[in-house]
């Protein structure tokens, strides 16, 4: 199964970048703030976070079991003054919700990476 990811950076509007580019495009600009990882579909270790340029000391992981509504959680995280980057997956999100999340990210100058596990045609 192929996967795709896209990155939404409110400052550059860069999209369709592979996850390996997250290090330069999003995470490095997040010094002194939290990187929120919302509803990851896998177990995240400190080594895995570090591999993608995220310090375990600055990662705020919100597990799927604790998220009642991913869309509202994303909007709240985007509005937080202490969260500068958000990483999530697009399961449970509609195209309209992703559009609204992007608009909120832009308005609050928060960077977001949305990883997709959907099949490519």
Image (cartoon, grey):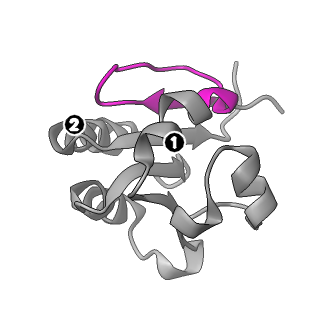
**Earlier-in-chain disc, 1 versus 2:** 1
- Numbered label attached to residue 81: none
Asked if 66 appears above or below 85 in the picture, the reply is below
Q: What percent of the width, then of the height, locates residue 121?
A: 70, 18
Q: Which label number is shown at residue 103?
A: 2
Are the residues tagged 1 and 2 within 8 Å (C-beta)?
A: no
Is 101 placed left or right of 16 in the picture? left
**Alpha-carbon neighbours of circle 2 within 10 Å: few (<14), some, or many (≥20)?**
some
Q: Secondary structure at mark 2?
A: helix
Going 59% across and 40% down the picture, which residue do you hit?
Answer: 115
Question: Residue 19 appears at what percent x and percent y?
Answer: 65, 33
Task: Specify the farthest residue to the right.
Answer: 1
Dividing the picture into quadrants, the one containing residue 73 is bottom left
The image quadrant that residue 65 belongs to is bottom right
Helix, strand or loop at mark 1: helix
The residue pinned by badge 1 equals 27
Q: Nearer the viewer, mark 1 or mark 2?
A: 1
**Residue 84 at x, y percent in the picture:** 35, 50
Q: How many marks?
A: 2
Residue range of the region highlighted in magenta in the rendering:
5-21
Magenta region includes residue 28: no
46 and 19: which is toward the camera: 46
| Rendered residue at 62%/26% (across/down) | 21
């Amino acid at each position: 199964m192929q996967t795709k990811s896209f990155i939404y950076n409110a400052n550059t509007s860069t999209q369709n970048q592979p996850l390996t580019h997250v290090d330069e495009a999003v995470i490095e600009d997040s010094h002194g703030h939290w990187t929120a990882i919302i509803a990851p579909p896998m177990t995240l270790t400190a080594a895995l976070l570090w591999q993608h340029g995220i310090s375990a000391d600055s990662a705020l992981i919100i597990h799927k079991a604790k998220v009642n509504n991913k869309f509202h959680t994303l909007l709240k995280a985007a509005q937080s003054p202490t969260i500068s980057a958000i990483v999530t997956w697009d399961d449970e999100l509609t195209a309209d919700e992703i559009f609204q999340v992007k608009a909120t990210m832009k308005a609050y100058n928060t960077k977001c990476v949305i990883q997709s596990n959907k099949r490519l045609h």
